[in-house]
Image (tube, grey):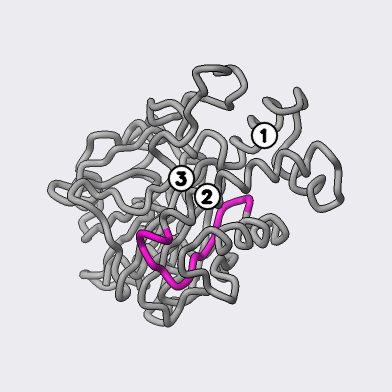
Amino acid sequence: MRICADVGGSFVDIAMVDADASIHHRAKFPTPTRDWNGFVDIFRQFQALHADKMTEGDAISLAFAGLPAPDNGRIISANIECTHGRRLANDLSQELGRPVFVINDADAFVLGEARLGVAKGHRRVLGVILGTGVGGGVIEDGKVVTGIHGIGGEWGHGQVIIPSPKAPDATPLFQCGCGRMGCLDTIGSARGLERLHHFLHGKTATSKDITHGFVSGEIHAVATVSYFTDILAGVLSVVLNTIPATIVPVGGGLSNSTELIAEIDRKVRASMLDAPEQPILAVTMLGGDAGLLGAYFAAD
């Protein structure tokens, strides 16, 4: 059995995963974002508790909210400061005495869905996450596709909102966490949907309230979601015209609104050069298990 964990900025979701990809002994702990020793202790204590279920060579595998560089494994993480700049797999392996594998959490999500979830059987998969941020990953023939710095499928970054020189204040241009201005992430995420709603209507509402309002026909929510989906679908259709995936698993909090995902799907297919007749966006089948299972497969 392997210890697998889905490590985010708020919680570490950790479990034992067996050879059948079944999840056992699951636990959840707050992420000690600034305390390396506290971070290591979560894994050390979980390993000690379940040592009788593991052999000497069994690995620990992490789906991680950060980017591990392919050449040296150093982590870029904005949310988990105690790991930033560390060779996380190497450092954690030395602490725990076991092989450690680290995969980006968005890549893990897509890998899980491609191996066991809604994208099983598809050769080329583009997965997207619409949650606190906009993320994603690309799978080709069952393998994660990344560039030389470990980046792949990050369709939420790069400026897509550009203010008009005639009316710059009429454009929803916001600072992105990556340091750029006008990234899709600034309006295409759950927080971005809320930010956009306030920009358009001067109203404060949660993303859940906005999506519920869209479904019920509330005028301001409908207007916000219409603009939101226009931009999101436009960018996604460009990506799909470039990377001809045959399915797009969708995760993150916004995927809970099937009506919202259906609206994005409709607009995406309308903008694709080779538009499929059937829906191409598909809500996650594995849900909250996708990251853990993707971490498990990353260690194969």
Q: In the figure, 116 relative to 63: above or below? A: below
Question: Would residue 41 appear left or right of 210 to someone viewing this image?
Answer: left
Residue 21, horizontal then vertical, whole percent: 43, 76
Give the amino acid at mark 3.
Answer: Gly
Q: Earlier in the sequence, mark 2 or mark 3?
A: 3
Q: Earlier in the sequence, mark 1 or mark 2?
A: 1
Q: CA distance from mark 3 to mark 1?
A: 22 Å
Give the amino acid at mark 1.
Answer: Glu
**Residue bearing the label numbered 3:** 8
Q: Earlier in the sequence, mark 3 or mark 1?
A: 3
Q: CA distance from mark 1 to mark 2?
A: 19 Å
Question: Would residue 71 appear left or right of 59 to someone viewing this image?
Answer: left
Looking at the image, the residue that sits furthest to the front is: 166
> Closer to the observer: label 3 or label 1?
1
Residue 94 in view of the camera? no
**Residue bearing the label numbered 1:** 194
- Quadrant housing the C terminus: bottom left
Residue 61, horizontal then vertical, whole percent: 32, 60
* Bounds of the magenta segment: 240-254
> Is the C-beta separation of discs 2 and 3 under 8 Å?
no
Give the amino acid at mark 2.
Answer: Gly
